[in-house]
Image (cartoon, rainbow, N blue to C red):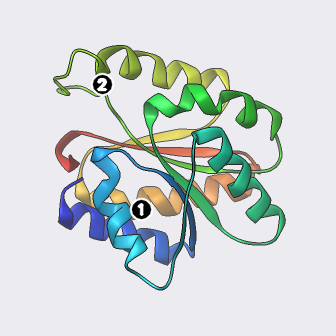
Amino acid sequence: MREAAAKLFVDGLKAANINLLTVLSDSWLFEPHRQAKADQFFSVIPVANEGEGVGICAGAWLGGKKAAILMENSGLRTACEPLARLQGIPVLLLMSYRGDWGDSPWWAANTGATTEPILNALKIPFKVVRQEADIVPSLAGAVRTMNAHRSHAAVLFGGELM
């Protein structure tokens, strides 16, 4: 993610009072990861896999904390079982959208093609964000949706942000 977009991303997390992040960062989300790690507002917990990060976020929610996981959308497949089991315990998924329109690596195509169908199968509401102006309102909307529905919510970042 470009530096200016990453700053908006971090500012949006702060505005939503999300201060605990589990991170299995990829190259596209390295910059928001770096900025959050340098900011004392956040507790940043690196994880070994996305399922572990989902579990930590769920535990944080049960303890009254506001948390999110930063991950590549390919990790959604790894996180499916924990996400399916944690119905009623919301987790905020913040994902790079590898395989999004215009992403050129051949290996990303299948990841992009399966992301939205997996989110739909898990009944996880999501928003795709491709422009800087949409970052902060999309993060706020994801938190509102997550709290109102008491369900997971996801924001996918792609397009001109990367």
Residue at label 1? 137
Q: Secondary structure at mark 1?
A: helix
Classify residue 117 as left or right of residue 33.
right
Hey, what amino acid is under mark 1?
Pro
- The residue mark sitting in front, 2 or 1, is 2
Residue at the image point whose x is 31% and y is 68% from the top: 8
**Residue 128 percent location from the top left of the image:** 39, 40
- The residues bearing labels 2 and 1 have C-alpha atoms spaced at a distance of 23 Å
Mark 2: which secondary structure? Answer: loop
Q: Is residue 134 above or below residue 123?
A: below
The relative height of residue 46 versus residue 102 in the rendered view (above or below) is below
Q: Give me the residue at 57% from left, 76% from top.
A: 17
Residue 130 quadrant: top left
Please say whether residue 159 is visible from this viewpoint. yes
Of the numbered discs in the image, which one, if any, rests on residue 99?
2
Q: Residue at x 51, y 63 (%)?
A: 140
